[in-house]
Image (cartoon, grey):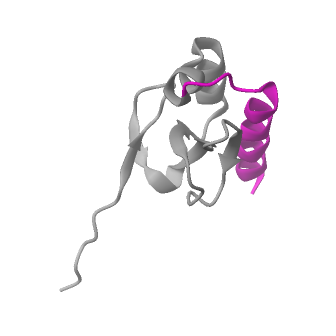
């Protein structure tokens, strides 16, 4: 009998929905206050998760939920990078 491993769930800052970590994109704030998209999920710093959907990213942008979660102003480039990643994945 195979042991069923627990799938780590994370909450989307935009929608409030719980999803497996693999279905989310992590945005991380470093100690220096730099915000970046963490595709590996292993960067050090405070992380916040967004669902892999354009709607979730737009909602996070509108509500500034990423900014509140990470306690820092989110540069527009971060949202653009998130959207690019999602669009690239939806093509594949």
Most distant residue in the front direction: 32
Identify which residue, 52 or 44, lies in the foreground: 44
Quarter of the image for residue 43 reads bottom right
- Residue 6 as seen in the image, left or right of residue 49: left
Identify which residue, 52 or 66, lies in the foreground: 66
Residue 34 coordinates in the image, percent (x, y): 71, 38
The residue drawn where x is 62% and y is 61% is 40
In this rendering, the answer to whether 63 lies above or below 75 is above
Q: Is 91 colored magenta in this rendering?
A: yes
Residue 45 coordinates in the image, percent (x, y): 55, 47
Q: Is 2 colored magenta in this rendering?
A: no
Residue 42 coordinates in the image, percent (x, y): 56, 60
Report the label total.
Answer: 0
Most distant residue in the top direction: 62
Quarter of the image for residue 41 reads bottom right
The residue drawn where x is 75% and y is 57% is 92
Magenta range: 71-92
Identify which residue, 51 or 1, lies in the foreground: 51
Q: Main secondary structure of the magenta part?
A: helix
Residue 52 coordinates in the image, percent (x, y): 60, 41
The residue drawn where x is 55% and y is 25% is 71
């Amino acid at each position: 009998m195979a042991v069923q491993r627990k799938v780590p769930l994370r909450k989307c800052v935009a929608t409030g929905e719980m999803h497996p970590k693999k279905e989310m994109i992590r945005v991380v704030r470093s100690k220096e206050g730099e915000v970046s998209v963490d595709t590996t999920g292993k960067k050090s710093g405070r992380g916040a998760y967004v669902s892999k959907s354009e709607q979730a990213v737009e909602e996070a942008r509108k509500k500034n939920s990423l900014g509140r979660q990470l306690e820092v102003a989110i540069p527009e480039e971060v949202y653009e990078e998130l959207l690019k990643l999602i669009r690239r994945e939806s093509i594949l």
